[in-house]
Image (spheres, rainbow, N blue to C red):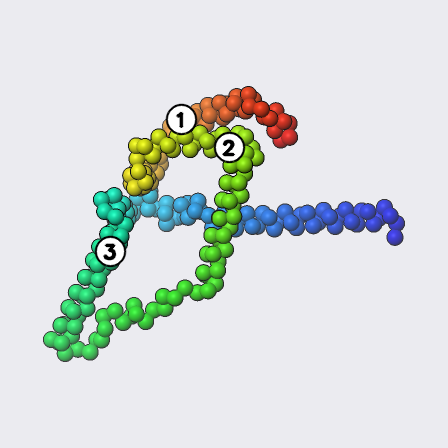
Amino acid sequence: MDPMQSAQISSSQGFADGQNSATKDSKLSDSFLSSSPVSLIQSPQVKDLVHWRDPKKSGVVFGLSMLLLLSLAAFSVISVVSYLLLALLCVTITFRIYKSVVQAVQKSGDGHPFKSLMDKDLSIPPETFRKNVDVSLSYINRGLKQLSRLFLVEDLVDSLKLAVVMWLFTYVGAVFNGITILILADILLFSVPPVYEKNKTQIDQYIDLARTQVNTTIAKLQEKLPGAGKRSKAE
């Protein structure tokens, strides 16, 4: 075979292998993004809840979540879990005794009131467990890679951004505790989407102005940092 033809064949094979690997990488990234928490937040069910498409359903979810968070703010986690389980047991025991009395009076043979629920298979399939473990492992590996990149200062600008964020969080932590932040997040989750939906045009304009200002400030800082010129040339 001609050396030129063999070189062309090897280069075409290498190009094909590169395309296949890129396709695999894109499929992996797509599957990772499709199973990320962002996709969960953007799911139609969650969107309907936070946009109050069904006010009764959204009100129940918002009320229960606020009640749980306020209970955790007032009591310990062990107390809240114990009270919840105790309340559930009181409901099921009362209902069980009530149905037994009714069956004894009416002399009916309906049997156990929770028989249909007890007959259901509540075990987790091994495939589902392995899938969730694999997804969790991908999150952990991705997080460890990002942490090592930031704390070992692979990119000086990104590490400085993290330092600024952590410095701001020290002030947030001095004013709020974790439960208070969760309560505020729950309120914002159910209040911001409907407000944004009604005033989308005006809010987008302010967001674009703020984003432009932040990008301009970051660009100026990057020009003054050491190594920023090399990074821009490499990009």
Toward which corner of the image does residue 227 lie, by quadrant? top right
Residue situated in front as seen by the camera: 16 or 166: 166
Q: Earlier in the sequence, mark 3 or mark 2?
A: 3
Amino acid type at mark 2 = Ser
Badge 1 element: helix
Amino acid type at mark 1 = Tyr
Instruction: Give the residue at mark 1.
Output: 206
Residue situated in front as seen by the camera: 148 or 7: 148
| Residue at horizontal 28 percent and vertical 47 percent from the top | 65
Above or below residue 170? Residue 48 is: below
| Residue at horizontal 44 percent and vertical 44 percent from the top | 38
Q: Is residue 191 visible?
A: no
Horizontal and vertical percent for residue 235? 62, 31
Residue lying at the far right of the rendered structure: 2
Question: Is residue 149 toward the left or the right of residue 46 in the image?
Answer: right
Q: Rate crowding at label 3 as few (under 14), some (14 to 19) or many (20 or more) other CA atoms within 10 Å.
A: few
| Residue at horizontal 84 percent and vertical 48 percent from the top | 5
| Residue at horizontal 44 percent and vertical 24 percent from the top | 209
Badge 3 element: helix
Instruction: Give the residue at mark 2.
Output: 159
Horizontal and vertical percent for residue 46? 36, 47
